[in-house]
């Protein structure tokens, strides 16, 4: 139920993000979700892609520092309170959300939340126990 996420360290300068997207485009790798956080000196680009291994290889060949992080993808109703319901149950269980990002599916009926927990396995078990739809990687990579 874990999803592989690429974490790419980028210098905070013009063109670095475009270089990453060019490499992935030329490799035929589709970006399914992304998050970019930055400081004045560097950024961390987090990506869910259609072909993790190909993306990792091509980016490393181009000199990028690339890591693999396990995250959890959760589907929730796209309505007020959907996120709060999940965060409340995590809070009650003492599971910390280190970071998260989200996107809305084309249908508009649901949103996909990508979570990084401090205790991933316990987070997954809690979500399952509460009948929260966890999206497996193979489905997320092709959505």
Image (cartoon, grey):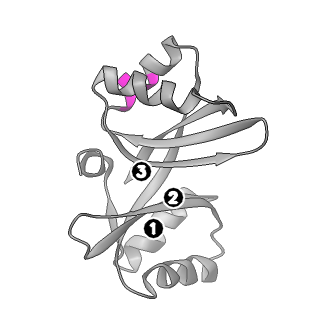
Residue that lies at the very extreme toward the left in this rendered image = 107
Q: Is residue 16 one of those drawn in magenta?
A: no
What secondary structure is marked by label 3?
strand
Query: Predominant secondary structure in magenta?
Result: helix
Marks 1 & 2, CB-CB < 8 Å contact? yes
- The residue drawn where x is 26% and y is 73% is 108
Q: Is residue 55 above or below residue 105?
A: above
Q: Position of residue 90 (x, y in %)?
A: 57, 76
Q: Position of residue 99 (x, y in %)?
A: 61, 59
| Lateral position of residue 99 relative to residue 31, left or right | right
- The residue drawn where x is 58% and y is 14% is 63
Crowd around label 2: few <14 · some 14–19 · many ≥20 (10 Å): few
Image quadrant holding the N terminus, namely: bottom left
Q: Position of residue 112 (x, y in %)?
A: 37, 64
The label shown at residue 121 is 2
Q: Is residue 113 above or below residue 14?
A: below
What secondary structure is marked by label 1?
helix
Decide which of tag 3 and tag 2 comes sooner along the chain: 3
Structural distance between the alpha carbons of marks 1 and 3: 12 Å
Residue that lies at the very extreme toward the right in this rendered image = 40
The magenta region covers 52-56
Structural distance between the alpha carbons of marks 3 and 2: 9 Å
The label shown at residue 72 is none
Location of residue 91 (image quadrant): bottom right
Q: Is residue 54 one of those drawn in magenta?
A: yes
Which mark's residue is nearer the viewer, 3 or 2? 3
Q: Is residue 94 above or below residue 6?
A: below
The label shown at residue 2 is 3
Structural distance between the alpha carbons of marks 1 and 2: 6 Å
Residue at the spot of label 1: 125
């Amino acid at each position: 139920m874990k999803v592989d996420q690429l974490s790419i360290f980028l210098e905070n300068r013009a063109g670095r993000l475009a270089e990453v997207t060019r490499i992935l485009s030329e490799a035929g790798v589709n970006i399914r979700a992304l998050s970019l956080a930055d400081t004045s000196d560097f950024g961390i680009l987090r990506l869910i892609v259609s072909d993790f291994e190909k993306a990792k290889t091509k980016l490393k060949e181009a000199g990028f520092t690339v890591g693999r992080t396990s995250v959890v993808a959760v589907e929730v109703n796209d309505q007020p309170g959907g996120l709060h319901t999940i965060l409340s149950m995590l809070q009650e269980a003492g599971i910390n959300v280190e970071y998260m990002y989200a996107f809305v599916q084309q249908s508009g009926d649901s949103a996909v939340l990508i979570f990084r927990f401090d205790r991933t396995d316990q987070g997954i078990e809690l979500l399952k126990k509460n009948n929260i739809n966890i999206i497996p990687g193979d489905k997320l990579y092709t959505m």
